[in-house]
Amino acid sequence: MRILVCISNVPDTTTKVKFSTDQKSFDDGGVQWIINPWDELALTRAMELKEDASNPVSNVTVVTVGSASAEPTLRKALAIGADDAIRVDAVSSDAYFVAAQLAAVAGSGDFGIILCGIESSDYNGSSVGGMISEIMGIPSVSAVSGLKLEGEEVVITRDIDGGREELSVPAPFVGVVQKGIAKEPRIAAMRGIMMARKKPLQVVPAADAESYTSYKEFAMPEPKAPCKMVEADNVKELVNLLQNEAKVL
Amino acid sequence: MSVLVYTENWDGKFKKLSYELLSYAKSVATLVGGDVNALSIGKVNQDELSSLGNYGASLVLSADGTPSGLDNQVYTEIIAAAMDKVGARILIMAHNNSGKALAPRLSVRLKAGLAAGVIAVPESVNPLVVSKKVFSGKAKGKVEILTEKAVLTLSQNSFEINETAGTASVESFDSGVDLAAAATTIKDVQKQEGKLLLTDADVVISGGRGMKSGDNWAPIEELATVLGAATACSRPVSDEGWRPHDEHTGQTGKIIAPNLYMAFGISGAIQHLAGVSSSKCIVAVNTDKDAPIFESADYGIVGDALKVLPELISEIKTVKAQ
Ligand SMILES: Cc1cc2nc3c(=O)[nH]c(=O)nc-3n(C[C@H](O)[C@H](O)[C@H](O)COP(=O)(O)OP(=O)(O)OC[C@H]3O[C@@H](n4cnc5c(N)ncnc54)[C@H](O)[C@@H]3O)c2cc1C
Ligand SMILES: Cc1cc2nc3c(=O)[nH]c(=O)nc-3n(C[C@H](O)[C@H](O)[C@H](O)COP(=O)(O)OP(=O)(O)OC[C@H]3O[C@@H](n4cnc5c(N)ncnc54)[C@H](O)[C@@H]3O)c2cc1C
């Protein structure tokens, strides 16, 4: 079985977000790029599955939709252990367009498991994984916090109201992963970094697809009112404020 | 041009979430000049269904056959059939687990642009332009929907519930979807009675490294019990094994938006805030008056969490008893 991990190339989590003077685009000056944290966990789990010899996983491929500037992030994914990488050469701001590209890649490669993160930390769409599955007409499972193989059977753990659920899903499918899928993101070792330079990174042209949405403008959130401080020995007052002012108790 | 709201019930009861969605949908429907239709899936009694009229619904479609499990494809089919039935242009869902699972599929299915995590009523309807959070809440962006139809998922707590007396007509809805056709098969369910799903809880009590040790969690749990709240923690706390991993909130943990988030001994790192900043009200208790959490909090106490917690518990018990 082959696994495809979709990698979104995003600004480092501590980035101070700035926009162009016309507020129409993200200002990426000085930004450090990383693998979207969820995607890093998905890749970590894919590697664990492949390394366990009892699993029928033959190959882990990473894919991103982006310009050449996203390639260092793909190399990082190769250094973590992916066997090969694909970059769909397109700059897009629309989740449907991105999903259409990824569905085309997934459909051409005989992948049994297609993994996406629950949210890309840049545009927070929570969209791409579900869209890929609907475009391909295959099952999707979301909020995936565990993934294992029992022979050829894929067994997934997901959170539900009041607990968790185990389910099995036929391949191919899209798993949208969240916290718990792997314990810690794997860090590339020196050897991995050396090897990554020689691993295949294929650039493919974008498929024809529409955009369903377009960003018009960005803004910083309104500054919030300052925090109301209450003395430590006056807990009564805090409860009063929560009850009668904030009305949240 | 009407609007369809996908409501969710828990054991036959609607929650605040659905009322918020309907109130929002009512404002949207007023802008586009149409009605609010609601779709309910599963067994819900007639009174509960028609009470959705109090929040703006004029018609409630009740698909009362219960699918065998939460299978994304089965639910997508039912919701798409309901969109067809009422001829709706806009589908509104919650930006929660099920919304995140279903909205993208429906976007493709209906050829409808998706704006996820919307925070306000559309600023225009022709074209449809809505605001949403981007960069984990560090900024917001205006999205234009380029397609005829649209799917909007509403960020929790971004819209006031608007209650006005009204009754909705309730219609039983047979979607024609084979409820047993699920591709996924449930193998095992583990439910803990009384344990709330963190992402759906109205109140969340959370502890950080300032709690000093996993052995100090009893007052956090007690406060949660008193308030009917869920418990959460910062990442180092779950990394240390003081608390289970599924309680960790933040950029790499759960993303939550309760009405009330109480943070005890949490410094307020940017990655932590990314998971909780959409909460309606944030309370922080921290010994350090300069802790960054106070910049994001609404109410704060500079003090020892281990001393404040017992006093808070007893005060809340007193107030609740009145
Ligand atoms: C205004 C704007 C400008 C942009 N500029 C650029 C740019 O200059 N260069 C560029 O490369 N992209 C750019 N993008 C694309 C953007 O980074 C996302 O790929 C796309 O918008 C989907 O984001 P989302 O928040 O919907 O993803 P989500 O649906 O939240 O992502 C969920 C998961 O889908 C997968 N995924 C998401 N995006 C990709 C991707 N691109 N490739 C592979 N897997 C993915 C990941 O697994 C991710 O965890 C831009 C987007 C916008 C809105
Ligand atoms: C890529 C990346 C992703 C991350 N993702 C997350 C994430 O998702 N979630 C997350 O939480 N973190 C995340 N982190 C870690 C984050 O940067 C912080 O290190 C972490 O949030 C700090 O946890 P804390 O507030 O519990 O601990 P600390 O920062 O150590 O803060 C403890 C606080 O307790 C106060 N204190 C001490 N004693 C008491 C007392 N008796 N009573 C009251 N207050 C007291 C102190 O003044 C201090 O402010 C991430 C980091 C990175 C690099």
Image (tube, coloured by chain):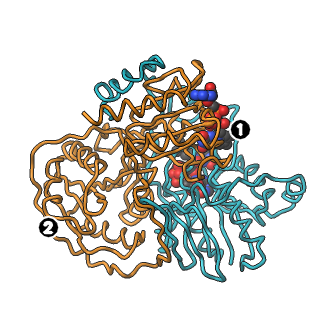
Image-based side of A82 in relation to B193, left or right? right
User: For this view, does B296 lie left or right of residue B51?
Assistant: right
Q: Residues within 10 Å of mark 2 (few under 14, many from 20)?
A: some
Q: Amino acid at mark 1?
A: Gln
Q: Which residue is mark 2?
A: B171
Depth check: give the residue in front, B163 or B297: B297
The quadrant of the picture occupied by the N terminus of chain B is bottom left
Quarter residue A193 falls in: bottom right
Q: Quadrant of residue B237?
A: top right
User: In the image, what residue occupies the spot 34% across and 71% down?
Assistant: B77
Q: What kind of residue is marked 2? A: Glu
Viewed as shown, does residue B1 lie left or right of B207?
Answer: left
Of all chains, the one bearing label 2 is B
Q: Colour of chain B?
A: orange
Secondary structure beneath label 1: loop
Identify whether A59 is placed above or below B213: below
Residue topped by disc 1? A32
Query: Which chain wears cyan?
Result: A
Marks 2 and 1, Cα distance to the nearest angstrom? 54 Å
